[in-house]
Amino acid sequence: MAKRRSSRKKKKKFSIERLIYFSIVAFAVIDTIQEEYPGLLSLLVSWTVIVLIIVGISYILYKNGGYRLSFASNRLKTSLINEVDSMDGLEFEHFLKPLFEAKGFHAKVTQGSGDFGADLKLTKQGRTTVVQAKRYSNSIGVSAIQQVVSAKAVYKAQDAIVVTNQFYTPAAKKLAKVNRVKLIDRNELKDMITDYHSTSSSTVLCRILNPFGLRLDRD
């Protein structure tokens, strides 16, 4: 037992001595950099802080675990979709605009009346998509599909979407499939809302972690 304790003391002593040694070397390097390159030191400190923030965030996410993150995400989805349920039709249309813009579309809310069944008009990479928005309290039937198909012809669009805060009847799903209309139901809308808020949070985080105003291009 005495030998083991002695061995532990030696290791601890060696560890402390090594820490002191590296600390002296680090201070010497910093002092030299400050004298030779005064601007470089502040740059190094700034990037060190950035790295520490990234490591800290990663550690927090790791400690939270998948279950906690999933639980928080589900709570956010439920809270926001409940807000959607209380909107009127026009509010819902304007609510959808930034969600589609976050996916790379140029989105425009059409006029309230005489829109020929298109509540939003999306453009992306030369393709036009018409969107029928249905903020209902009941399931969506075939009429919504018929309206957006008509709008597709009027606006000479290549694609058509119906999005709702509810779900679709079997007949609506069948008609949409025949006419190649994309259906976004309550669950997919929740995902769109969560993705939008995640993208917004990432943008804010990038601004925090980019104090030098460097251009950060996305591929």
Image (cartoon, grey):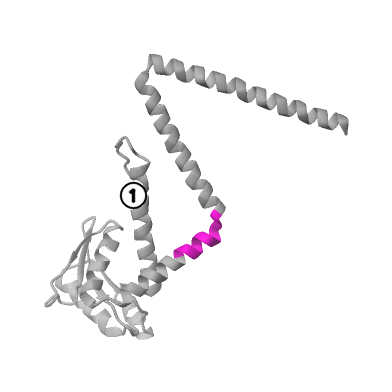
Is 121 positioned to the left or the right of 68 in the image? Answer: left
**Magenta stretch, overall SS:** helix
Magenta-span inclusion, residue 48: no
Q: For the magenta stretch, what is the residue range? A: 64-73
Identify the image quadrant of residue 194. bottom left
Residue at left offset 38%, top offset 26%: 42
Residue 7: x and y, percent?
80, 28
Residue 2: x and y, percent?
87, 31
Is 38 positioned to the left or the right of 12 in the image? Answer: left
Identify the image quadrant of residue 104. bottom left
Magenta-span inclusion, residue 67: yes
Identify the image quadrant of residue 113. bottom left
Residue at left offset 35%, top offset 65%: 193
Mark 1, other Cα within 10 Å: few <14 / some 14–19 / many ≥20:
few
Disc 1 on helix, strand or loop? helix
Q: Is residue 92 above or below residue 214?
A: below
Q: Nearer the viewer, residue 54 or 108?
A: 54
Residue 47: x and y, percent?
41, 33
Image quarter in which the C terminus is found: top left
Image quarter in which the N terminus is found: top right
Residue at left offset 43%, top offset 35%: 49
Q: Nearer the viewer, residue 92 or 80?
A: 80
Q: Nearer the viewer, residue 170 or 63?
A: 63
User: Residue at label 1?
Assistant: 203
Three-letter amino acid code of the residue under disc 1: Thr
Residue 184 in sight: no
The count of marks equals 1
Residue 75: x and y, percent?
45, 68
Q: Nearer the viewer, residue 205 or 195?
A: 205
Is 208 positioned to the left or the right of 97 in the image? Answer: right
Residue 35 in sight: yes
Q: Is residue 179 above or below residue 25?
A: below
